[in-house]
Amino acid sequence: MHRSQPLYKEVKQHITESLRDSKWRHGQAIPSEPLLAKRFNASVGTVRRAVDELVAENILVRQQGRGTFVTSHTRDYMLNVFFQIVGNDGRKEFPRPEMLSFKRGRADLATEELLGIGHGELVFMVQNLLRLQGKPVIVDNLRLPAKLFPDMSENLFVDRDTTTYGLYQMRYGITVVRTVETISAVLADAKTRKLLGMAHPAAVLKIMRTAYTYKDLAVDTRIRFVNARHHHYLSLLGKR
Amino acid sequence: MHRSQPLYKEVKQHITESLRDSKWRHGQAIPSEPLLAKRFNASVGTVRRAVDELVAENILVRQQGRGTFVTSHTRDYMLNVFFQIVGNDGRKEFPRPEMLSFKRGRADLATEELLGIGHGELVFMVQNLLRLQGKPVIVDNLRLPAKLFPDMSENLFVDRDTTTYGLYQMRYGITVVRTVETISAVLADAKTRKLLGMAHPAAVLKIMRTAYTYKDLAVDTRIRFVNARHHHYLSLLGKR
DNA sequence: AAGTGGTCTAGACCACCAT
DNA sequence: TGGTGGTCTAGACCACTTA
């Protein structure tokens, strides 16, 4: 048989499409491997290979004896996969968010480019202050395209006990699968210094992050300023 | 058969041990899969699974029709796997190093702890200035345990056209397989500002990195200060 | 007990590389 | 042409979860 693409890649793509189209919702089990094999006219081994890759990408989770599940963006999951700020003592902790402002309007050109939206399209702009161990450590400026989040409102960001990505998934069925982060160091401006309780002059981490769902669709973009005096960004490269 | 560990994990461990003991040198082909299968009393499929994991960890490289090779720490490989500083235009470039100083002596306690060496053991201390597009961008303070690098000398760091990790591999058979990086932002001191051509006050990235070889043995540790005005640190999380 | 994923095998065929 | 890795299959048996 002559194929332009290996069968397991095709199976993987079919599964990804079902996820993108919300055929299987987060937290639910997908069909068993023998069932998928029958559906895609492939052997169980081939299906396993496709699922293996999606598991490696944190999109599916296997549980022996129970089934294979669509990853839920729980707090713990987020902490492990997408949150890289740890205390200098090595401990990682879930940040406590406080919303500072919520607006709807137009974004600047750079933001429109990052989000891949047209000029003048509406976005939501949310500013949050994140606390770790009670102290303000991160100022977060979030931008999300209004068309992806039809009835987004201020209330959803207050008193939530989920992450923003968890919110996207639970309420809109949008699952963030990867992010791109750009990290630099800048002198904090007066407002940021005040929020983070830093004296002049103060160096802070500037982290620009854009999040993507299946098919490389941008979901949100944000700029974070981090007081890196008692915390740092952890990056692991290579094996493991 | 009852096993405490899956067979493919054992095979993987055997292969890793052969690599650690330099039985197979970098750039060389390891034995073919049928041969390994025979040697370890396993099926080819099981050997493939072990090799798959080592390939995913960038330790081996497959080449269809030719064989499976021990990864060589070429410039290109380093750039892709361990070097995360990119220009703000998105371009990545190989840095040009200039050695500022080379010393042999005792390290401070923190360094001894990071390297996992005893108190008072000798280390080499190397300071380099790294240029990108001709401009000084990174000040690198390197520490390596003398006992791992017996006849290390200043000359080896001058006029080299390899990376430090490439040097370890070619001359000492030591292969770096993973690194741990800790990133924060600080105000640059006068000396660093001068080297990087920055005015007062200046915020720089402070990157502390420790590199490990097989079996979690620390190979070197370094502190880098990066002028993040025209460059940044790139971090990709999640799938792909 | 039935169903799920986890491991392992043996073998077929294909694509690619060296000679 | 022979050897290498790449894909795919069919089936056995194990470990775990649920009912």
Image (spheres, coloured by chain):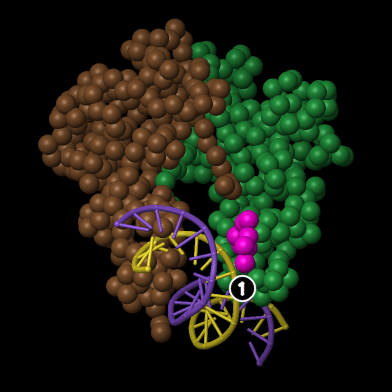
Chain colours: A brown, B green, C yellow, D purple
Residue A232 versus residue B18 in the image, above or below: above
Left or right placement of residue B163 versus residue A102 in this view: right
Count neighbours of disc 1 (C-alpha within 10 A) and say few if under 14, some if 14 to 19, many if 20 or more. some
Foreground pick, A172 / A180: A172
- Disc 1: host chain: B
Magenta highlight range = B1-9
Tell me, yes or no, whether the highlighted magenta stretch contains residue A100.
Answer: no
Prevailing secondary structure class for the magenta stretch in the rendered image: loop
Question: Which residue appears at 23% of the width and 24% of the height?
Answer: A159
Find numbered disc 1 in the image and state the secondary structure of the residue it sits on: helix
**Position of the N terminus of chain A by quadrant:** bottom left
Q: Is residue B207 left or right of residue A85?
A: right
Asked if A199 appears above or below B217 in the picture, the reply is above
Q: Is residue A26 visible?
A: yes
Instruction: Give percent across and percent down for residue A106.
Output: 17, 31
Residue B56: % across, % down: 55, 56
Q: Determine the residue positioned at 76% across, 38% down.
A: B157
| Furthest residue toward left | A151
Q: Amino acid at mark 1?
A: Val
**Is B187 left or right of A93, judged from the image as shown?**
right
- Quarter assignment of residue B159: top right
x and y percentages locating residue B152 in the rendered image: 83, 38
Q: Which residue is mark 1?
A: B44
Query: What residue is at 69 percent from the left and 47 percent from the top?
Result: B214
Q: Is residue B105 above or below residue A218?
A: above
- Nearer the observer, C10 or B54: C10
How many numbered dots are placed on residues in this image?
1
Residue situated furthest right in the rendering: B151
Provide residue A179's location: percent of width, then percent of height. 38, 42
The verdict on residue B5 being magenta is: yes
Residue drawn at (50%, 13%) of the image: B201
Residue in the foreground of this view, choosing between A67 and B61: A67
